[in-house]
Amino acid sequence: MTDTNGYLPGCGEYCGLCPYHTGVKQPLCPGCNVVKGKPFWGECKIYICTSDHDVQHCGVCEEFPCEDFINHYEEALPEGQRNAVFRAGLLAYRARHGDTKTIKLLEKLRK
């Protein structure tokens, strides 16, 4: 379940483009996988859930997409719910095509 770079945590985010992971913003975050689901902002419920279900990411969980995943976003951000739905699709892609292709897709999409 661990990725030493913290690039692809279980939730479907991509740390490689996160300003806190890349050092553009502070505090520096090494990624959820490195800090075992306890980033600077608190405790990640998705990390705990993937650990409890013994899966690398939500996309390979038998319960995916569950209500906890779809409702895991920051309420103050208007794009939060859309982001959760985007991450659901991304995790389905990751489950089928793997981490390397997923990272390449994300880098292409977010340029």
Image (spheres, rainbow, N blue to C red):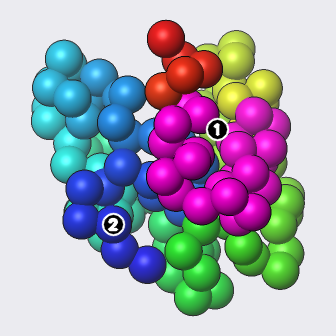
Could you tell me which residue is drawn at 78 percent across and 55 percent down? 92
Q: Is residue 110 visible?
A: yes
Tell me residue 69's x, y (percent): 73, 55
43 on left or right of 103: left
Could you tell me which residue is drawn at 31 percent across and 55 percent down? 6
22 on left or right of 43: left
Tell me residue 39's x, y (percent): 29, 51
Could you tell me which residue is drawn at 51 percent across and 37 percent down? 104
Query: Of residues 100 and 56, which is closer to you in this image?
Result: 100
Looking at numbered disc 2 in the image, what kind of residue is underneath it?
A: Asp
To which quarter of the image does residue 94 belong?
bottom right
Q: Which residues are magenta?
A: 85-106
Residue 3 covered by magenta stretch: no
Looking at numbered disc 1 in the image, what kind of residue is underneath it?
A: Tyr
Tell me residue 87's x, y (percent): 69, 41
Mark in front: 2 vs 1: 2
95 on left or right of 100: right
Query: Of residues 99 and 70, which is closer to you in this image?
Result: 99
Could you tell me which residue is drawn at 55 percent across and 22 percent down? 108
- Identify residue for label 1: 73
| Mark found first going from the N terminus, 2 or 1 | 2
Tell me residue 59's x, y (percent): 72, 64
Q: Residues within 10 Å of mark 2 (few under 14, many from 20)?
A: few
Counting the numbered discs, the total is 2
Query: Of residues 95 and 41, which is closer to you in this image?
Result: 95
For numbered disc 1, what is the local secondary structure? loop
- Identify residue for label 2: 3
Q: Residues within 10 Å of mark 1 (few under 14, many from 20)?
A: some
87 on left or right of 70: left
- Between the residue at mark 2 and the residue at mark 1, the CA separation in whole angstroms equals 22 Å
